[in-house]
Image (cartoon, rainbow, N blue to C red):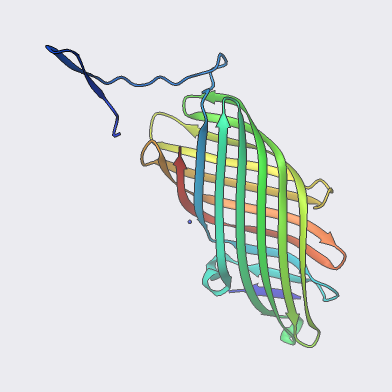
Amino acid sequence: MRISGTYFAAALAFAGPASAADLYTVEEPIPAITEPGGFEARWQVNAAVYLFAPSLEGTVGVGGLPTVDIDAKFSDLLDHLDFAFMAVAEVRRDRIGIFGDLLYTKLSLDGTGPGGLLNASLTNQLIIGTLMGEYRVAEWGQSSVDLMAGARVWGVTNDLSISGLGSASDDQYWVDPMIGVKSRLQGASRWYLTGWAMIGGFGVSSDIDWDLFGGIGYEVSDRISLVGGYRGVGVDYSSGGFVFDVIEHGPILGGVFRF
């Protein structure tokens, strides 16, 4: 059964009188404090909020109803997307960091079964929360490479209705171990490349769980960047009559803030 869905200083200077006849202003850059290994020994916080325009493809099953194939493409976004939200945060000091990611989407799909004899509809709500520890293995200039390991929590709600066969609804929550790598590449300009690759599941909960993101960023200032790119998330999970073997992917656009 197939469903086709129609689916981002003022700098403070001290002017202090050294004497009544000698008034001067000193403006000096504050050098970065580094550990012996060369990594910055200060707390750094990055936070980002994105607009996400997802497509959804794969196989979904609920209860005793037949599994359905879904194909909700980005070109049909306004017809199937109810809501999407994506946020990322990172806290680090020296080589060690913590990475967090939150993704939420709600999609409503309509279609027909084989031969066009049966009508079917699916509402899918998906929330993914990821928490990873980071270890910086390389850093040069504004470029870096981090290894990551942690866990991902999935929360999926499927409401499926097939004319003549009935309807069913189910919620499933599970946790997958995850490993990955994250990188940023930047030269002398304000433009940079950023991205990550993660994989997990390994049969603990999902058979496989993966996440790929690549983007291009531009530093508007020392504290604000704009980033555009593409992200894909895939999972293959089943439990009883619940089947969720899908890929969600699409363009993203957002802002990154540094503290």
Instruction: Give the answer, above or below, for where 248 lies relative to 191.
Output: below
The number of callouts visible is: 0
Q: Position of residue 95 (x, y in %)?
A: 60, 26
Q: Position of residue 226 (x, y in %)?
A: 42, 46
Q: Residue at x 46, y 51 (%)?
A: 254
Q: Residue at x 31, y 19 (%)?
A: 28
Q: Position of residue 205 (x, y in %)?
A: 82, 52
Q: Residue 116: name its quadrant.
A: bottom right
Q: Residue furthest left?
A: 21
Left or right, 117 with reference to 99 = right
Quadrant where the C terminus is found in the figure: top left
Nearer-the-camera pick, 82 or 26: 26
Q: Residue furthest front?
A: 20
Q: Residue 80: name its quadrant.
A: bottom right
Instruction: Give the answer, above or below, for where 26 lies relative to 146.
Output: above
Q: Position of residue 203 (x, y in %)?
A: 84, 48
Left or right, 149 with reference to 256 = right
Q: Residue furthest right?
A: 240
Instruction: Give the answer, above or below, for where 97 lies relative to 48.
Output: above
Quadrant where the N terminus is found in the figure: bottom right
Q: Residue at x 56, y 70 (%)?
A: 82
Q: Residue at x 39, y 29 (%)?
A: 188
